[in-house]
Amino acid sequence: MQRTDDLLVVRQLRTIEAFDLRARQLNDLAGKYRQAELAILSMAQEVATIELAWTRIKQWSESSAAESMEATFLERLDQSLDCGSLVINALQRDLFGCIGTRTVGRFKQRSKVVWNERGLHDHQDS
């Protein structure tokens, strides 16, 4: 009977350890979600700021003041537009990979973001 009791205690301890490990893993994952959410919010704000800047540049370029700008400035502006297109296309591909075209569960979306956190930081550093 003692042997059965010992086995039961060992199994209970293993079960407790397994639950403890999963609880720690879930807490770690929750922390990553918070970090990913902050990174996404920050990136969304940066993209909105850039969009506003390009809107103002477009308005300015359509005004008569833009006609007097030198060719070097306009070439540089064109290069910036090309670069911006490359960055936004890369971001779009990565976002498509995270959220796709169909609606998926919030957990699944957030999981993909967490697992692609390095890609988010790469875009943020760009």
Image (cartoon, rainbow, N blue to C red):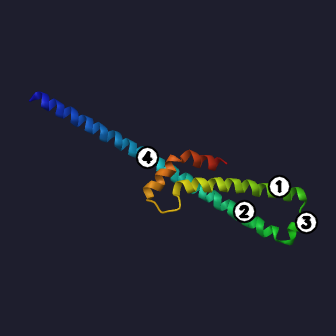
Q: Which residue is drawn at 21% across and 32% down?
A: 10
- Secondary structure, mark 4, is helix
Toward the front, the furthest residue is 101
Which percent across, then down, holds residue 21? 35, 39
In front here: 76 or 99? 99
Q: Quadrant of residue 78?
A: bottom right
Give the labeled residue for mark 2: 53
Crowd tier of the residue under label 1, counting other residues whose Cα lies within 10 Å: few below 14, some 14–19, many 20 or above? few
Q: Distance between the residues labelled 1 and 3?
A: 15 Å
Q: Which mark is residue 68?
A: 3
Q: How far apart are marks 4 and 2 (CA)?
A: 36 Å
Q: Distance between the residues labelled 2 and 1?
A: 15 Å
In front here: 108 or 114? 108
Give the answer, above or below, for where 31 lies relative to 101: above
- Left or right, residue 111 beside residue 92: left
Q: Residue at x 50, y 46 (%)?
A: 115
The type of residue carrying mark 2 is: Ala
Label located before the other in sequence (4 or 1)? 4
- Secondary structure, mark 1, is helix
Give the number of the mark in front: 2 or 1.
Answer: 1
Q: Which mark is residue 124?
A: none
Give the labeled residue for mark 1: 76
Q: Distance between the residues labelled 4 and 3?
A: 55 Å
